[in-house]
Amino acid sequence: MKDFRGLASATLIGSMPHRDRQRAIELILRAVPDIPVWPQLPAYSAEQMMVQYAEGMPGLVREDDKVFAGTDSPGFDDETYSFYEEYLEVEEGTKAVGNSRFKMGPETGATFDLFLDTLAEAAKSTKFRAVKGQVVGPFTLLSGMKDQDGRALLFDERYADIGPKLLACKARWQIEKLKAFGAPVIIFLDEPGLAGFGSSAFITVTAEQVRDLFSEVVAAIHSAGALAGIHVCANTDWLLGFQSDFDIINFDAYTYFDRFVIYRKACLDFLKRGGNLAWGIVPTTDVESIIAETPEKLAAKLAAQVNELASEDMPAEKIISQSIITPSCGCGSMSESAAERVLELVSATSRIVAGK
């Protein structure tokens, strides 16, 4: 899959603010027809990031809107044993992942299922460059989820092993579904939590530990025949991505390119190995910027950044051929009108960049 090239096609991070599932999907198919992506709709509590991907985790407790791991519950050990038993059955091929705890349920997977149906119809007249799905990244899941005492699961050795296995199987289940469309499948690990890596809250967590969390999920994605990407909002230590086996690195180019380009050598090496950059060039955090920006200005901003990154053996044209255009982050927390404006900007900016 290393021969995949983005060719400045557009895609999205995933989340949208809409409650009308069909409308959200149709907006996406119009805006990013080359690399369509199923939308997470956090307006539905079952599709909020932690809830959607913690499904199937042993010890999971739901109290009102709160989700946590009850490691002190009487049945925790039995649940954990059952989790590993089912995981091994899936790994050994004696149980289909589609018949396991690792698939999305009727509530968590409602939008995904509708996306599959809608895309099947669209595929009759459209050829996709790729189809994209996503799972929450293991660092974000384990640093964001707590136990009954408020302690992050990242610091519980049991969950440090369970988390990547859970997400690896969830990714494999998505890939099996998305492969039906005959295009390369891309699965992003969404890692907003990595913006906090290196802070006092995670001072004891090493880069090697984070890469170990990635490795099991990425290996599962690759073994299922798909491409693995990573998305981080804001900024992080980008060597975490470049020194892992990702095929696509997605970063906030609109606000944080000056910090990303610090890793220029590692980035160029990544591109030379056949990796792709997903440029989050369309703003998502500031409504005024979303309204004020134009595709022409965003394309010019991106061109300047590409030229700054380029080298003699990795010229700008080649970087563009190994690029994808995205928003800087998901759109789930903004208004519907602002999100739809972001989709328009992503689509139009991609067309300008691809045309050049």
Image (cartoon, helix red, strand yellow):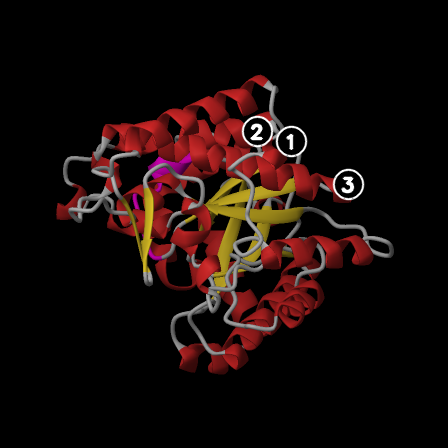
Q: Are marks 1 and 2 in contact (CB under 8 Å)?
A: yes
How far apart are labels 1 and 2 at the CA level? 9 Å
Distance of mark 3 from mark 1, alpha carbons?
14 Å
- For label 2, count other residues whose C-alpha is less than 10 Å away and answer few (under 14), some (14-19) or many (20+): some
- Residue 82, percent across and down? 42, 27
Residue 172 spot, x, y in % from top left: 57, 34
Q: Residues within 10 Å of mark 3 (few under 14, many from 20)?
A: few
Task: Name which residue type carries label 2.
Answer: His
Q: Which residue is mark 2?
A: 222
State which tag comes first along the sequence, 1 or 2: 1
The stretch drawn in magenta includes residue 240: yes
| Residue occupying image coordinates x 40% and y 38% | 241
**Picture disc at residue 166:** none
Looking at the rendering, the stretch of residues picked out in magenta corresponds to 234-242
Q: Position of residue 112 (x, y in %)?
A: 61, 54
Cα separation, mark 2 vs mark 3, equals 16 Å
Task: Give the residue type that dot 1 points to.
Answer: Met
Tell me the tag on residue 1.
Answer: 1
Residue highlighted by disc 3: 182
Left-right relation of 204 to 159? left
Residue 91 seen in the figure: yes
Query: Which residue is at 37% across, 24% downward?
Result: 81
Is residue 160 depicted above or below 41 in this figure?
A: above
Q: Secondary structure at mark 3?
A: loop
Q: Are marks 3 and 1 in contact (CB under 8 Å)?
A: no
Q: Which sits in the foreground, 33 or 310?
A: 33
Q: Residue at x 40, y 33 (%)?
A: 164
Counting residues from the N terminus, which is met first, the one under dot 2 or under dot 3?
3
